[in-house]
């Protein structure tokens, strides 16, 4: 077991290093000279050189890459002498636009994205699994067909269309919800909840549809399994047959995709956050892309990659815990 | 019979190791599935390779058909080393050795008609289909005991035994020198099994192909084999002419296998034959009156 | 002779059992008006090819027919009519008094639970007030009775950690822990190696001798029933072809179909019957 963990951890490090290198190469090779960009309109060649030197852009590729990586772990220092600025680990550099430390910017935005992600994930998990169960129990009946219609609709509406129309109907026309504004949970929990309700719904609806279908298919399939027949032949009550022998095998695959989907969302919901004006990581990404704020784009990319890789590992570990067949070292 | 000079297939010291990767820090685990196996199959004979699951019999068959590579040893087919064949020679080999698998449904493409399935080996071999696909398929289906009018049907429309006949028809399409039957009748009901064995025997008499018959059921093997090789734990523990192996087995494991076969009491069988004879006599007498 | 049998009713009495499946063209009967008895402590073989309705017969007795299937006729178990029993009452019979083992032991065991849990859960659901620990002990004892070595340790293992024959032993242990009066075994050895098959058949015989349970053995292989059962029912496409004592069926079959089945059994000491006479493949019907 510990060997399995070690293997996975090592694999994770390799993947993250690869992602770092890849994003670094893209920005190094593809983007216009950031020094020129930072310097602005009234600029002299000397000033540009100074900026280059401060940011370390005059160094060869591998040196820059090394400085970046070590900055993540031990921090780094920009410039020399009295003008030097210390950037503590984990250092992701400074925004070209606002000169703020990127790490701080991300840490400020992360709670918002996390709130959105957790709420949406709970919503789609509960509604998806419930919808799937109802469909499976009432297979072929009205409820099943009704839910099938809903899921089809849910899957075919693009996020931004749903976001805009929800906002228009619920806020502008009906006035049921307040226009979203930044309120912390501690100040006004109700306002906070209403604020996040729309983004949660928008993000959850597509996934809920997918989870409904998956749950339905898995439950129907597991009910056909021979071991369900065995359980019934043992004289177990229908409740026990369902709970232990139909649901557990059916829901296990859902746990695994849920982990990945959730990790994906933690890295920011670009469109939804932008539409609702929520200052999360997704909005940060959108803003920094339009302004070509390289350190921020890179940090957001790395964060997303990190979350996905960690998510994948958590899912693997969960799977090992849930499904005895994958457990390593279970020789006869 | 097993004199090397006339053997169509000659296997010597065949070894297959399977390894399971242990990850970055783990040691790879090695498992020897086939251990120093040597056997010969002469032209026109049927060698039955018998053993229980995990004995290595199917792995051996797969190496001979060149579906997997051996770890060591040699496999000569018609005088040439099978695992050194390339290009045209390999292509020709694929036509000369055909495999019939255990599960007919999973080894026949469910979306293809019988006609397409049966002529596919010829198409891969870039040979002409003699007499056109329809007539060719019809003739083959008739020979394996299927209704030739059903050539446009799909595998799922046939019963298990019939689907296995399609598998045999496909193997026969290229007139192979050898058929490898890998548990080809194991999944069939007893009555259907008997018919398919019967079919294989008749076809072999007509066509003269050699057969490597992989099975775990000795009673089945008794019906079809010329010679028998018994495998256990990756090794051949006993080889011999059929009657010698069945009547005076030398190895303990062979004896154990033979003892395990469920059998109808011989005295019941004998009495049935007497009763049947009596019944026929009676009927004849009644008819004669 | 009949006075002796009148005092003790048979363990199982099946009369006019008919199982229907709804199809596009109306209902198709897969079991047609079947009659048979199983004496107390007796062993009955139901023999037929796939599609003969032999498995549906066993599921009908258990009350486990697939959705949509209909059942009519009478199934009397130890004097109780099962067809009119409420589901709750039937559940008390199922697993406890009538137990069933199936063909493929791997897919018939839930991969997510240890074999101990799966043996114990049947026991606990039938015997109210049994503690987890007591059920565990029963599971270990049951595993020991089917000759699984080191049962105290293996009770914690999962189905995939057992070989095919051992899995079938686990299935039998599961059933045995309830001490059923009737055991229905549906092709219990078809997926197993020959030597393992012999062991499982021996085990079933041993359990019958120990507990006096009745046995219904369902198979396509007459050689298997000839070693185990004393009464045989031959079925074809839902119809009863003939039935009688094992000796009578094997020595003096009355029906052509039974003779064909007998001829088809490959003999270890002879080339016989169908294999000598080159029968036409017409016995296989189109689907």
Image: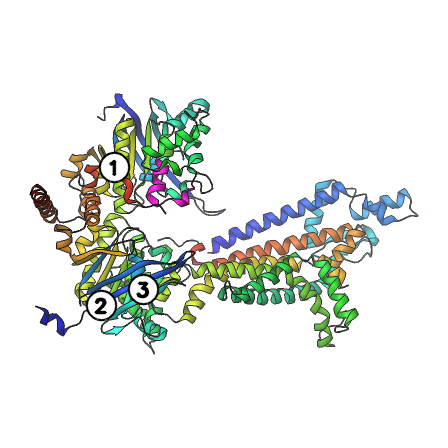
Determine which quarter of the picture holds residue A31: top right
Residue range (magenta): B153-168
Seen from this angle, which residue lies furthest right? A42
Tell me where residue B79 appears, x and y as whole percent.
33, 21
At mark 1, the secondary structure is helix
Determine which quarter of the picture holds residue B286: top left
Determine which quarter of the picture holds residue B84: top left
Q: Which chain carries label 3?
A: C
How many angstroms separate mark 1 from mark 2 (CA)? 40 Å
At mark 2, the secondary structure is strand
Category of crowding for the residue at label 1, using alpha-carbon neighbours closer than 10 angstroms: few (below 14), some (14–19), many (at least 20) = many
Evaluate whether residue C90 shows in this view: yes
Find disc 2 in the rendering and name its residue.
C13
Find disc 1 in the rendering and name its residue.
B198
Tell me where residue A229 appears, x and y as whole percent.
37, 62
Q: Which mark is residue B4?
A: none
Tell me where residue A47 appears, x and y as whole percent.
88, 46
How many angstroms separate mark 1 from mark 3 (CA)? 36 Å
Overall secondary structure of the magenta section? helix
At mark 3, the secondary structure is helix
The numbered mark, 2 or 3, whose residue comes first in the sequence reads 2
Find disc 3 in the rendering and name its residue.
C60
Tell me where residue A168 appears, x and y as whole percent.
77, 66
Query: Would residue B26 be found to the left or right of residue B229 on screen?
Result: right
């Amino acid at each position: 077991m510990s060997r399995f963990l070690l293997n996975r951890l090592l694999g994770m490090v390799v993947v993250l290093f690869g992602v770092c290198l890849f994003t670094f190469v893209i920005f190094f090779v593809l983007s216009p000279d950031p020094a020129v960009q930072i310097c602005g309109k009234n600029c002299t060649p000397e000033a540009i050189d100074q900026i280059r030197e401060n940011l370390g852009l005059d160094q060869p590729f591998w040196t820059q890459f090394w400085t970046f990586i070590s900055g993540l772990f031990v921090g780094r220092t920009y410039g020399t002498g009295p003008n030097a600025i210390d950037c503590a680990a984990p250092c992701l550099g400074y925004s070209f636009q606002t000169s703020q430390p990127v790490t701080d910017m991300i840490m400020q935005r992360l709670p918002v994205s996390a709130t959105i992600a957790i709420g949406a994930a709970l919503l789609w998990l509960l509604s998806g699994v419930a919808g799937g169960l109802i469909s499976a129990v009432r297979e072929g009946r009205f409820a099943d067909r009704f839910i099938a219609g809903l899921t089809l609709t849910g899957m075919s509406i693009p996020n931004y269309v749903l976001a805009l129309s929800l906002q228009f109907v619920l806020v502008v026309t009906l006035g049921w919800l307040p226009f979203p504004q930044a309120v912390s949970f501690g100040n006004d929990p109700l306002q906070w909840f209403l604020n996040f309700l729309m983004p949660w719904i928008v993000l959850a609806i597509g996934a809920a549809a997918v989870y409904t279908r998956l749950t339905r298919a898995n439950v129907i399939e597991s009910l056909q399994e021979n071991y369900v027949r065995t359980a019934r032949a043992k004289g177990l009550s229908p409740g026990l047959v369902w709970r232990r022998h139909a649901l557990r095998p059916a829901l296990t695959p859902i746990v695994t995709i849920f982990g990945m989907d959730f990790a994906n969302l933690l890295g920011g919901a670009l469109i939804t956050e932008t539409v609702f004006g929520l200052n999360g990581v997704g909005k940060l990404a959108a803003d920094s892309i339009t302004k070509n704020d390289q350190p921020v784009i890179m940090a957001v990319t790395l964060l997303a990659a990190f979350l996905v890789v960690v998510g994948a590992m958590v899912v693997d570990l969960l799977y090992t815990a849930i499904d005895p067949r994958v457990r390593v070292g279970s020789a006869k | 019979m097993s004199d090397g000079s006339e053997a169509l297939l000659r296997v010597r010291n065949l070894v297959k190791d399977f390894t399971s990767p242990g990850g970055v820090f783990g040691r790879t685990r090695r498992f020897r599935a086939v251990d120093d196996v040597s056997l010969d199959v002469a032209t026109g004979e049927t060698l039955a390779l018998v053993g229980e699951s995990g004995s290595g019999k199917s792995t051996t068959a797969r190496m001979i058909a060149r579906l997997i590579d051996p770890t060591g040893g040699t496999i000569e087919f018609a005088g040439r080393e099978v695992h050194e064949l390339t290009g045209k020679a390999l292509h020709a080999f694929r036509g000369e050795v055909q495999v019939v698998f255990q599960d007919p449904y999973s080894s026949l493409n469910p979306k293809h008609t019988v006609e397409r399935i049966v002529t596919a080996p010829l198409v891969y071999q870039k040979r002409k289909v003699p007499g056109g696909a329809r007539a060719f398929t019809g003739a083959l289906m008739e020979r394996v005991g299927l209704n030739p009018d059903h050539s446009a049907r799909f595998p799922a429309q046939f019963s298990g035994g019939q689907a296995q006949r399609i598998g045999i028809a496909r193997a026969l399409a290229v007139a192979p020198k050898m058929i490898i039957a890998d548990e080809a009748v194991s999944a069939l009901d007893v009555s259907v099994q008997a018919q398919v064995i019967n079919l294989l025997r008749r076809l072999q008499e007509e066509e003269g192909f050699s057969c490597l018959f992989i099975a775990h059921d000795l009673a089945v093997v008794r019906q079809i084999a010329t010679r028998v090789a018994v495998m256990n734990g990756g090794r051949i523990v006993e080889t011999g002419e059929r009657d010698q192996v069945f009547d005076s087995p030398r190895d303990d494991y062979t004896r154990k296998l033979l003892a395990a076969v469920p059998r109808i009491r011989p005295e019941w069988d004998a009495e049935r034959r007497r009763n049947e004879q009596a019944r026929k006599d009676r009927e004849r007498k009644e008819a004669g009156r | 002779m009949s006075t002796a049998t009148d005092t003790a009713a048979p363990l199982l009495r099946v009369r006019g059992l008919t199982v229907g499946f709804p199809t596009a063209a109306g209902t198709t009967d897969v079991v047609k008006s079947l009659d048979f008895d199983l004496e107390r402590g007796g062993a009955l073989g139901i023999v037929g090819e796939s599609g003969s309705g032999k498995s549906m017969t066993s599921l009908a007795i258990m009350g486990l027919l697939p959705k949509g299937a209909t059942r009519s006729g009478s199934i009397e178990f130890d004097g109780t009519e099962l067809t009119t029993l409420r589901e709750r009452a039937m559940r008390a019979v199922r697993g406890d008094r009538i137990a069933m083992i199936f063909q493929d032991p791997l897919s018939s065991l839930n991969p997510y639970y240890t074999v101990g849990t799966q043996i114990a859960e049947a026991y606990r659901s039938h015997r109210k007030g049994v503690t987890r620990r007591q059920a565990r002990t029963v599971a270990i004892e049951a595993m020991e009775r089917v000759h699984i070595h080191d049962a105290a340790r293996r009770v914690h293992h999962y189905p995939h950690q057992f070989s095919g024959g051992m899995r079938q032993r686990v299935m039998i242990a599961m059933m045995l822990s309830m001490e059923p009066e009737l055991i229905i075994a549906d092709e219990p050895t078809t997926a197993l190696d020959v030597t393992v098959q012999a062991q499982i058949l021996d085990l079933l015989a041993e359990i019958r001798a120990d507990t006096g349970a009745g046995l219904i053995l369902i198979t396509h292989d007459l050689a298997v029933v000839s070693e185990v059962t004393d009464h045989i029912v031959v079925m074809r496409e839902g119809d009863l072809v003939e039935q009688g004592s094992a000796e009578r069926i094997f020595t003096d079959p009355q029906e052509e179909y039974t003779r064909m089945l007998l001829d088809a059994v490959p003999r270890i000491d002879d080339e016989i019957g169908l294999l000598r006479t080159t029968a036409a493949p017409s016995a296989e019907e189109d689907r």
